[in-house]
Amino acid sequence: MKYAFTFFLLFIFAVQTGAQEKSLTYTVDGKPYEGYYVSPSQGAPLIILIHDWDGLTEYEITRAEMLQGMGYAVFAADLFGKGIRPKELQERQRLTGELYKNREKMRSLLNAALNEAKIKNANTDNAVMVGYCFGGTSVLEFARSGADMKGFVSFHGGLMTPEGQDYSGVRGTIIVFHGTADESVTMDHFSNLAKELEKYKIPHEMTTYGGAPHAFTVFNTERYRKDADRKSWNRFSEFLHQTLK
C-alpha cells in the first residue's frame, strides 16, 4: 500500500509539471530530437532513460520524475525524432526495425543522448543507462559497444545478441528484469544471454518474474503486473543506490 501511494503521488506530480517545461530539443546528424531532462541538484548521479517503441511518452516522463524524486538526474532520450510518437503498430515496427537494421545509427543516437546530458552539465562519469522494451534492447546494444557507464539495465527488453556481436567489451554491470510469461522474448533468449555474460565474465544480475508477460511494468495496460513491477523497481532502486555514489 505504501508503494502504491508513493507511486500515485509521483505520478500526479509528473502529470502536473508536464513535459513542456523540461523538454529540450537537440540535433543529431542535422535532425531534431526532443528529449526530457530533470535534475534535483548540480552533480547528481545520472540516469539515461531509453523509451519503448512508441517513443518518448508520458510513461518515460513519469519514470524520470520518480527517479528525480529519489535524487537522480535523468535524461530521457529520443531515438525517433522530434514529434515522432507512433501510435500505429505498423509505424512502430518500421521505426524500430530501421534501427535494428542499422546498429551504428542506434549507437550514434545513444551516444548523442549521453553527450547532450554532458552539455547540460550532468554527471556523466557517475551514470547508468536504463530502457524499457525496445529501450531495453537499445541499452544492451550500448553495453556491447563498450560504452563507459557503471550499469546497463533492461526492463523486458530484447535479449538476443545480433550476429557478429558479443559482450566481450562491456565496461559496466548488466541488469536484466524479465517476465517468465513473455512470449516475445523467450526464456531461451534469457538463458542464452546469461551463458554469454558468464562466458565473458561480465558482472550481471538477471531476474525473471513468474506470470509476468512482455511489458509487465507498463501501468494502465492489460500486461501490467503490479507485483513484478514493484519487485523489479525495488531491486533497480537498490542497484542504483549501490552503484551511483
Image (cartoon, grey):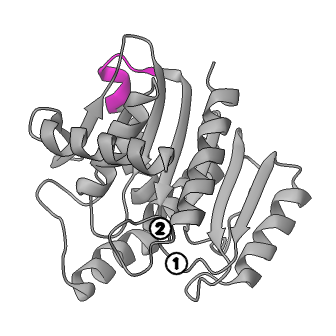
Against 216, is 22 above or below? above
Dot 1 crowding, Cα within 10 Å, few <14, some 14–19, many 20+ = many
* Quadrant in the rendering for residue 125: top right
Dot 2 crowding, Cα within 10 Å, few <14, some 14–19, many 20+ = many
x and y, in percent, of residue 180 in the image? 68, 79
x and y, in percent, of residue 102 in the image? 42, 68
x and y, in percent, of residue 206 in the image? 75, 59
Dot 2 lies on which element?
Answer: loop
* Quadrant in the rendering for residue 134: bottom left
Magenta range:
116-123
Which residue corresponds to the image point at 47% horizontal and 72% vertical from the top-left? 215
In this image, 27 relative to 69: left or right? left
Dot 1 lies on which element?
Answer: loop
Of the numbered discs 1 and 2, the one sitting upstream in the chain is: 2
x and y, in percent, of residue 210 in the image? 69, 77
Q: Relative to the observer, which residue lies in front, 48 or 67?
A: 67
Q: Which mark is residue 147?
A: none
Which amino acid lies under the numbered mark 1 shown in the image of this protein? His
> How far apart are labels 1 and 2 at the CA level?
8 Å
| Residue at mark 2 | 133
Against 188, is 34 above or below? above
| Residue at mark 1 | 214
Which residue corresponds to the image point at 39% horizontal and 20% vertical from the top-left? 122
Mark closer to the observer (1, 2): 1
| Circles 1 and 2 in contact, beta carbons < 8 Å | yes
Farthest front residue? Answer: 1
Which residue corresponds to the image point at 45% horizontal and 17% vertical from the top-left? 44
Which amino acid lies under the numbered mark 2 shown in the image of this protein? Cys
